[in-house]
Image (spheres, grey):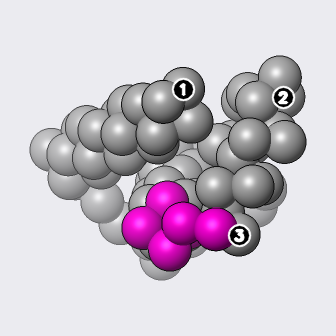
Amino acid sequence: MQFDHHPFMAGHPELQDKIHELKKSNTHFAKLLREYDGICLEIGRAESEVPGYLMSDLELEQLKKERLALKDEMLAMVNA
């Protein structure tokens, strides 16, 4: 079963050069970006009801909150 995955860079095409630069030069930013992409994959699997992949609504909401916090932190770094 296929599911949607929305990488951080795809959501902000106007910032791709800055994101790429930070990814290469800032290890903390690179770590946040990996975490963000991993959480997006988990959310996509849960929302697509991938067979064998079970997640409660509460767990899904927590992941969405974590993703939003990561996104906010990364956007603050990009816009700094």
Task: Name the secondary structure under disc 1.
Answer: helix
Residue annotated with mark 3: 24
Residue annotated with mark 1: 79
From this view, report whether residue 75 is shown above or below residue 42. Answer: above
20, 57: nearer the viewer: 20
- Which of discs 3 and 2 lies nearer the camera? The answer is 3
Is 6 within the magenta?
no
Q: Name which residue lies at 84% across and 42% down.
A: 17
Task: Name the secondary structure under disc 3.
Answer: helix
Q: Amino acid at mark 2?
A: Pro
Tell me which label, 3 or 1, sits earlier in the chain: 3
Q: Looking at the image, can residue 63 be seen? A: yes
Mark 2 crowdedness (10 Å alpha carbons): few <14, some 14-19, many ≥20:
few
Q: Looking at the image, can residue 5 be seen? A: no
Q: Name which residue lies at 83% across and 23% down.
A: 14
Query: Which residues fall within the magenta stretch?
Result: 25-30
Mark 1 crowdedness (10 Å alpha carbons): few <14, some 14-19, many ≥20:
few
Q: Amino acid at mark 1?
A: Asn
Circles 2 and 1 in contact, beta carbons < 8 Å:
no
Circles 3 and 2 in contact, beta carbons < 8 Å:
no
Residue annotated with mark 2: 13
